Amino acid sequence: MAIVTTTRDYQDDAVQLEAFIAYDDAVAGRRPAVLINHAWR
């Protein structure tokens, strides 16, 4: 088992954002995901 981490850049209108992705590379196929969305207002 190895936890792989990476980042992915994406854009929302004119705002450049970065996502952090971590997953276990020993698991094949589809698996559930957790999305955390921060509210900064």
Image (tube, helix red, strand yellow):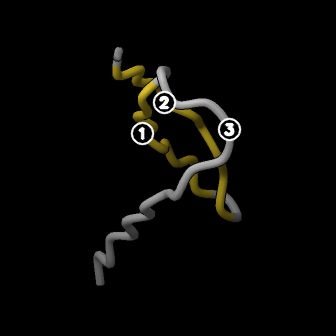
Q: Amino acid at mark 3?
A: Gly
Point out the image quarter for the C terminus: bottom left
Q: Amino acid at mark 1?
A: Phe
Q: Nearer the viewer, residue 36 or 16?
A: 36
Along the horizontal axis of the image, is 6 left or right of 1? Answer: right
Q: Amino acid at mark 2?
A: Thr
Task: State the residue position of label 3.
Answer: 29
- Observer-side mark, 2 or 3, equals 3
Estimate the x, y position of residue 13 in percent, counting from the top left.
Answer: 70, 64
Give the mark nearer the N terminus: 3 vs 1. Answer: 1
* Residue 1, numbered circle: none
State yes or no: discs 3 and 1 in contact (Cβ < 8 Å). no
Work out whether 12 lies above or below 26: below
Callout 2 secondary element: strand
Indicate the quadrant where residue 39 lies.
bottom left
In percent of the image, x 41 and y 20: which residue is there? 4
Task: State the residue position of label 1.
Answer: 20
Along the horizontal axis of the image, is 37 left or right of 14? Answer: left
Estimate the x, y position of residue 37 in percent, counting from the top left.
Answer: 40, 70
Q: Nearer the viewer, residue 30 or 7?
A: 30
- Observer-side mark, 3 or 1, equals 3
Q: CA distance from mark 3 to mark 1?
A: 20 Å
Callout 3 secondary element: loop
Give the mark nearer the N terminus: 1 vs 2. Answer: 2
Work out whether 9 lies above or below 5: below
Which residue of the protein is positioned furthest toward the top in this rendering? Answer: 2
Task: State the residue position of label 2.
Answer: 7
Estimate the x, y position of residue 3 in percent, counting from the top left.
Answer: 34, 22
Give the mark nearer the N terminus: 2 vs 3. Answer: 2
Q: CA distance from mark 1 to mark 2?
A: 5 Å
Callout 1 secondary element: strand
